[in-house]
Image (cartoon, helix red, strand yellow):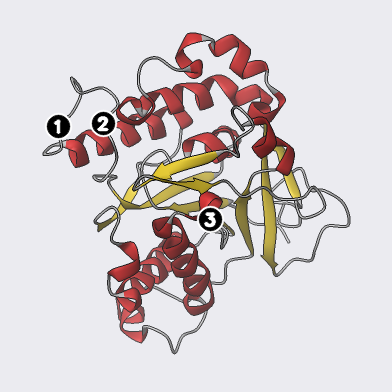
Amino acid sequence: MKLSKLTLMAVFAHPDDEAFGTGGTLTKYAAEGCDVYLVTATRGEAGQIAEPDLATTANLPYVREQELRRACQLYGIHSPRFMDYVDGQLPIVHQGQAVGKLVRIIRELRPQILITFGPDGIYGHYDHIAVHRWATIAVDLAADPDCFPDQLADACEPHQVSKVYFRALPEEQVAAMAEEEKPAAVMMDGVPFYFVGRRRDEITTVIDVSDYVEAKLRGIQCHTTQVGRQNRFADTPDEVMREPWFRRESFVLVRSTVGWPERVETDLFAGLR
C-alpha cells in the first residue's frame, strides 16, 4: 500500500504528556515530511506550578497552552488541537460527546497512525485512562458511517485508522526511575501512582530518535511550569541526551489493518510506505 501523504495523530490528556515518551517520534516523522498532529484534551490547569513567577492559578491554562504551542513548533508539527475540557474532570464529562469530538477530528485529519495512552495510563492517571477509552472507541466509530452521521453532512467522510499504538515504558526504564528503593511514581492527591512498565516481549515497536534528541529535550524544557528550571534536563542536558532510554521511544501496536510485525518494528508506518 502506498499513500501520497502519511499522517500521524497523537491523542493525550495534558500539555507535556507528549514530551517525554513521544517528543522524539513526533519530531522524527515531521522531519521526514509526514503530517503530524497532536490532540490534547485539556490545558493542564490542575497542574502544580513549579516556578511561581511564570504563572498563577488564574492564568495557568493560558500559560500551559503557550508552552505546548512552543513545544510543537520545536517538534516541527502542526499547532496543537485542544478538546477544551478541564484538567482532572475527564472521567466525569459527557463521554459520548468527547468520543464524538475525536471521531470528527479523525475523520477530518484522516491519520493512518494514531498514538495514545494504554489502559494503564502510564501511571494510572484517571485523565489518561479516560483519553485512552475515548481514542480507542473513536477509532472504531470513525470508520462506521452509521455513527455520528450528522458529521457526514459537513463532508466529513468515514475514515479507518490503519494502526493504533499505545505509548509504553519498558520495565527496565521504570526500574531505573526508582529512587531509594521506592518504585517510581507520580504523587497525586498525596499518594503515589506507580509507573507501569511493559515487558520487552510486549513491546512491538521501538523508534530510534537519536537524531532528534535535541528537539525532544527542548520540547520538555518548554513545559517549565511543570518541570521547573532546575532539573536534569536543564542541568545536565548532554548527559540526558546520551541516555539510551532518551534515544529510544517504545510503543505497543494494538490494532492493524496492514498485518502484524514478525519482529520488533522500527517504523510506525511499516506496511504503509
Between circles 3 and 1, the one closer to the viewer is 1
Q: Nearer the viewer, residue 29 or 57?
A: 57
Residue 124 percent location from the top left of the image: 50, 55
Q: What element carries label 3?
A: loop
Numbered mark located on residue 49 in the image:
2
Residue for badge 1: 56
Between circles 2 and 3, the one closer to the viewer is 2
Q: Do the residues labelled 2 and 3 touch (CB within 8 Å)?
A: no
Disc 3 from disc 1: Cα separation: 29 Å
* Amino acid at the residue labelled 2: Ile
Q: Is residue 124 above or below residue 258?
A: above
* Amino acid at the residue labelled 1: Thr
* Label 2 neighbour load within 10 Å: few <14, some 14-19, many 20+: some
Most extreme residue toward the bottom is 146
Q: Are marks 3 and 1 in contact (CB under 8 Å)?
A: no
* Label 1 neighbour load within 10 Å: few <14, some 14-19, many 20+: some
Residue 200 percent location from the top left of the image: 80, 47
Residue for badge 3: 117
Q: Which of 18 and 256 is in front in this view?
A: 18
